């Protein structure tokens, strides 16, 4: 009871502070104080503090199972383990938005602290723009999705959390992903502030670069976590399904990656100012529209907690307001770049970064069209369609080969101008060797051998080039590690998709079968009673040609509240392959649908993604 | 007539324009090929011609007492309470697939009453019904 009141009023107080900050920052701007007023720091901290209090009180309500709170009633249950009571706080719509707000207020506070050296006016404007976003989210939370609604009479028991969300990876996936999304909001506000102040230059680029990298790292890791979760929990054995909810997180990532590279050009050459600005506006808009699509119930997925059109409309209006605001500012304050003095040569690092941007924009538009086209079609002519993986694979994979080659060669070029004569024949020879090598490695697989060996070759080429650069003296560690990680990523996905095997069969207990020289025995099944679910654990033995025995224990969980079945795959990971087995209940509890997969190099997909983000982390701490 | 710079820039612009056109063309082309339409059993009955190379989705309820299990395949009947279609499927089956529950199957039509499913879509919760199925069912009530 008390915690609900506390949380609610503390939210309202936070909203009032947000309004105060909006006016106060304008006031400070007008009466130009040389130093940023101490009050701004205190109010920002206070605001962060109010959101922390309201967040903690929600967590507390979840922990003590206070069902007088509607959110707790809808998403919790007394028999749920403590860990999932806590993580259940952001496993629902209201709570996750409160988390958004928490991260938003934290980021602006940190931003102001860490940019002491920046001009006062710029900081005040950043606070102003960020407060527009923050007050919008406060309003959204208070008006359409208040986490502190009362329920009367107080129910005895809650409805429980969707069991597939009761998982450690999903406990940290939302906070990490939000750090990435919200990080893009800081970039957005800072870019608008520096646009109005007309100080988009290499100094500013150096300062904003760290924030771009931070957001990018969190976004990468957030997507990775979601992907790992989908791999072991959804039971299909894949890690990326081109599902709309996945795509909406990939779109800001592509945009942010383009920005990450462009800001380098701005830093070194003072070029591409407007483009940097457009990218930062686009990244944030994509993050917001991702939230809109996921939260409004337009896309169907685990993430759609409630289908409430009102919420969708609110976010949509807010999104349009922000986009129009930023475009207006862009056209009013845009500063004509003086191109005549700074030449842009065709063979230079700048061009290679531009090429990266083109590829990113192409990938982005493919994903964007593939994701939104079904929605538009449904709204316009009420035709229901879905766009599956073949669409994306067909449009993205062929271009990946060129992308990889440019990625290998681009960083070797020097700034401003390089010349043709430096083209080394050794590299061309290396490239041909790579293609031959990849042809040799995959020659036994069936389809489209030429095509796959070119992609494999390009990825190998990138890998050798980065290793080669690593052996030389003057190098950029973060870039090398990230690019190396990316080549590893492409290679492991390639081999994974080429050499994966899978079979599925309806089996009885005690049955035995042979698949590709491996014997699969369904030994037995045991039943256990846990606090909030009953589990059926099966025991399988896999005997390969050399008589090595692997035991696997896939599980089916029957949750009591809500009454849902989930399959927990059993996976054995080694550095060469993953053995993945999952069972599903069919009629009664006698026959089970067994799905057994061997997925080579699965673990390398995760490792390479980690390498890509480690590159980013090193970039932040460099110098 | 024009300077070298202008010519270069024009060349560059037309190059970009070409690339944009090409990519738009590619996207639209493969959109056309890879779109999967959602059709209810009644709509299948009314189809004028059957294209058994086109991937489609069929949704409705799994009819009571129609699920038959064999070693490596499952057969069942999808109904929208007006018309029915027989489905054969081999592959992994999601947990919530059972009689009297909503289902969406993706695959190819053999003819108007036989459907060869390649995928059965997973659902995440007991009460959840794919919106397409819900609508198809409501239409026929």
Image (cartoon, rainbow, N blue to C red):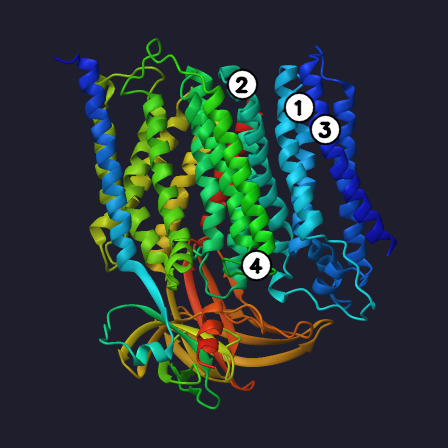
Number of the label disc, if any, that sits on residue A21: 3
Residue appearing at x 38%, y 32% in the figure: A467
Picture coordinates of residue A482 (x, y %)?
45, 35
Count neighbours of disc 4 (C-alpha within 10 A) and say few if under 14, some if 14 to 19, many if 20 or more.
some
With respect to residue A85, does A486 lie above or below?
above
| Residue A401, horizontal then vertical, whole percent | 28, 41
Indicate the quadrant where residue A270 lies: top left
Residue A144 % position (x, y): 67, 52
The reply to whether callout 3 and callout 4 are in contact (CB within 8 Å) is no
User: Nearer the N terminus, badge 1 or badge 4?
Assistant: 1
Closer to viewer: mark 1 or mark 4? 4
Farthest residue in the left direction? Answer: B1
- The number of callouts visible is 4
- Protein chain holding label 1: A
Are the numbered discs 3 and 2 placed on the same chain, yes or no?
yes
The Cα–Cα distance between marks 3 and 4, rounded to whole angstroms, is: 33 Å
Q: Residues within 10 Å of mark 2 (few under 14, many from 20)?
A: some
Quick one: label 3 or label 2, which is nearer the N terminus? 3
First of labels 2, 4 by sequence position: 2
State whether residue A271 is above or below residue A101: above
- Mark-to-mark CA distance, 2 and 4: 39 Å
Q: Can you tell which of label 2 and label 1 is closer to the viewer?
A: 2
Q: Residue at x 83, y 59 (%)?
A: A64
């Amino acid at each position: 009871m008390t915690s609900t009141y506390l949380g609610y009023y503390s939210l309202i107080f936070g909203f009032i502070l947000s309004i105060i900050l909006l006016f106060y920052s304008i006031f400070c701007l007008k009466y130009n104080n040389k130093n940023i007023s101490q009050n701004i720091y205190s109010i920002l901290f206070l605001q962060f503090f109010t959101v922390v209090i309201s967040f903690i009180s929600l967590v507390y309500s979840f922990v003590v199972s206070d069902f007088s709170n509607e959110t707790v009633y809808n998403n919790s249950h007394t028999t749920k383990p403590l860990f999932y009571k806590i993580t259940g706080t952001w496993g629902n719509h209201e709570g996750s938005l409160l988390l958004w707000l928490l991260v938003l207020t934290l980021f602006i506070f940190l931003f102001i602290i860490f940019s002491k050296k920046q001009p006062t006016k710029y900081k005040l404007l950043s606070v102003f723009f960020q407060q527009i976003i923050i007050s919008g989210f406060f309003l959204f939370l208070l008006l359409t999705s208040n986490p502190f609604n009362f329920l009367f009479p107080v129910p005895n028991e809650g409805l429980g959390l969707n069991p597939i969300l009761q998982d450690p990876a999903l406990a940290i996936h939302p906070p990490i992903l939000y750090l990435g999304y919200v990080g893009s909001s800081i970039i957005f506000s800072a870019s608008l502030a520096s646009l109005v102040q007309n100080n988009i230059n290499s100094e500013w680029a150096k300062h904003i670069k760290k924030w771009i990298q931070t957001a990018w790292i969190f976004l990468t890791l957030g997507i990775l976590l979601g992907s790992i979760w989908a791999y072991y929990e959804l039971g299909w054995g894949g890690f990326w399904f081109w599902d709309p909810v996945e795509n909406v997180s990939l779109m800001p990532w592509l945009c942010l990656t383009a920005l990450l590279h462009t800001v380098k050009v701005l830093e070194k050459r003072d070029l591409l100012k407007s483009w940097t600005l457009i990218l930062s506006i686009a990244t944030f808009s994509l993050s917001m529209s991702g939230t809109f699509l996921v939260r409004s119930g337009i896309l169907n997925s685990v993430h759609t907690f409630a289908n409430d059109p009102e919420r969708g409309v609110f976010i949509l209006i807010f999104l349009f307001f922000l986009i129009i605001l930023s475009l207006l500012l862009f056209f009013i304050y845009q500063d004509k770049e003086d191109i005549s003095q700074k030449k842009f040569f065709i063979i230079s690092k700048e061009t290679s970064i531009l090429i990266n941007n083109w590829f990113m924009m192409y990938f982005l538009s493919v994903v964007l069209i593939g994701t939104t086209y079904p929605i538009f079609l449904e709204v316009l002519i009420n035709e229901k369609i879905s766009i599956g993986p073949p669409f994306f694979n067909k449009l993205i994979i062929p271009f990946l080969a060129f992308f990889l080659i440019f990625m290998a060669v681009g960083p070797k070029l020097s700034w401003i101008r390089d010349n043709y004569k430096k083209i080394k024949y050794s590299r061309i020879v290396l490239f041909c060797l790579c293609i031959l090598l990849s042809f040799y490695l995959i020659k036994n697989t069936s389809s489209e051998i030429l095509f796959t060996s070119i992609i494999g070759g390009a990825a190998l080429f990138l890998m050798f080039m980065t290793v080669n650069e690593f052996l030389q003296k003057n190098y950029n560690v973060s870039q090398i590690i990230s690019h190396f990680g990316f080549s590893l990523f492409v290679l492991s996905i390639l081999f994974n998709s080429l050499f994966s095997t899978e079979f599925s069969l309806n089996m009885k207990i005690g049955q035995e079968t042979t698949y590709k020289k491996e014997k699969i025995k369904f030994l037995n099944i045991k039943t256990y009673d846990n606090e909030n679910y009953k589990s059926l654990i099966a025991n399988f033995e896999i005997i390969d040609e050399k008589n090595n025995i692997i035991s696997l224990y896939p599980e089916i969980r029957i949750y009591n509240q809500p009454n849902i079945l989930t399959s927990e795959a059993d996976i054995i990971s080694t550095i060469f392959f993953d053995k993945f087995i999952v069972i599903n209940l069919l009629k009664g509890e006698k026959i089970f649908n067994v799905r057994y997969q061997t997925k080579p190099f699965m673990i390398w997909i995760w490792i390479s993604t980690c390498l890509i983000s480690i590159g980013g982390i090193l970039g932040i701490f460099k110098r | 007539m024009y300077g070298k710079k202008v010519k270069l820039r024009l060349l560059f612009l037309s190059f970009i324009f070409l690339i944009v056109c090409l990519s738009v063309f590619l996207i639209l082309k493969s959109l056309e090929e890879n779109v999967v339409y959602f059709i209810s059993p009644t709509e299948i009955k009314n189809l004028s011609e059957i294209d058994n190379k086109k991937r489609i989705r069929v949704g409705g309820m799994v009819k009571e007492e129609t699920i038959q299990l064999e070693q490596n395949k499952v057969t069942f009947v999808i109904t929208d309470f007006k018309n029915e279609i027989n489905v054969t499927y081999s592959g992994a089956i999601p947990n919530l697939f059972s009689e009297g529950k909503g289902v969406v199957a993706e695959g190819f039509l053999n003819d108007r009453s036989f459907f060869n499913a390649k995928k059965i879509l997973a659902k995440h919760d007991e009460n959840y019904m794919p919106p397409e199925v819900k609508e198809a069912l409501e239409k026929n009530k």
